[in-house]
Image (spheres, rainbow, N blue to C red):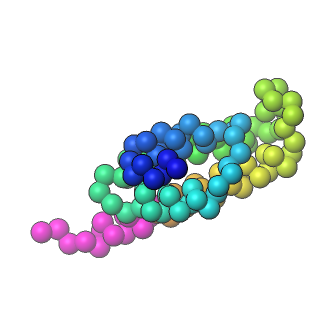
Amino acid sequence: MVRELGDVEILESYFLLVWSEWNYIRDLGEMIDSIRGDFGPGIGVGHHREVLIERLDHVLGQLDRGLEHLRKHNPNLEAHNISTAEKDYGRLRDVLLEVDREALEILTRTPFR
C-alpha cells in the first residue's frame, strides 16, 4: 500500500520504521520487489540505499547480540524468532547490496558526454 504512493522518500521512511529487531517481516517478497524496483539503479536513489543498508546493519547488529539480550526487553522471544529475523533481514541487506552493485556497474559503464 505504501509502495503505491510512488514516493521513495515515504517508502524509505516506512522501511526505516518497520525494520526493527522487534518487528517480523511479513511480506519479504514484496519488500525485495520494492528494493529492486523502487531503489534500483536510477538517479537520486543511491543515498536511499545507503540509509536503508545502515538501518539493516543496525537491526542485524542488535539481533547478533543474542536471545538473552533481546529477552531483557521482550521475554516472549524464542530462538527461532531471532533466527528467522536474521535470515530475513540479511536477505534484504543482500538484495540492497546487489542492487547497489548493479547501479555502480551501470554508472561506470555509461560513457560521460
Instruction: Inspect this view and state whether residue 89 appears.
Output: yes
Residue 88 percent coordinates (x, y): 68, 54
Residue extent of the magenta highlight: 100-113
Is 12 rendered above or below residue 104? Answer: above
Majority secondary structure in the magenta region: helix
In the foreground, 72 or 9: 9
Residue 50 percent coordinates (x, y): 44, 47
Residue 90 percent coordinates (x, y): 65, 54
In the foreground, 110 or 88: 88
Residue 24's image quarter?
top right
Is 57 rendered above or below residue 103? Answer: above
In the foreground, 96 or 9: 9
In the foreground, 63 or 81: 81
Is 66 rendered above or below residue 39? Answer: above
What residue appears at the point 33 percent right and 60 percent down from the top-left corner?
42
What residue appears at the point 52 percent right and 50 percent down from the top-left corner?
1
23 vs 75, left or right, is left
Does 107 lie within the magenta span? yes
9 vs 59, left or right, is left
Residue that protrudes farthest toward the left in the picture: 113
Does 20 lie within the magenta span? no
Residue 89 percent coordinates (x, y): 65, 51
What residue appears at the point 64 percent right and 39 percent down from the top-left corner?
20
70 vs 17, left or right, is right
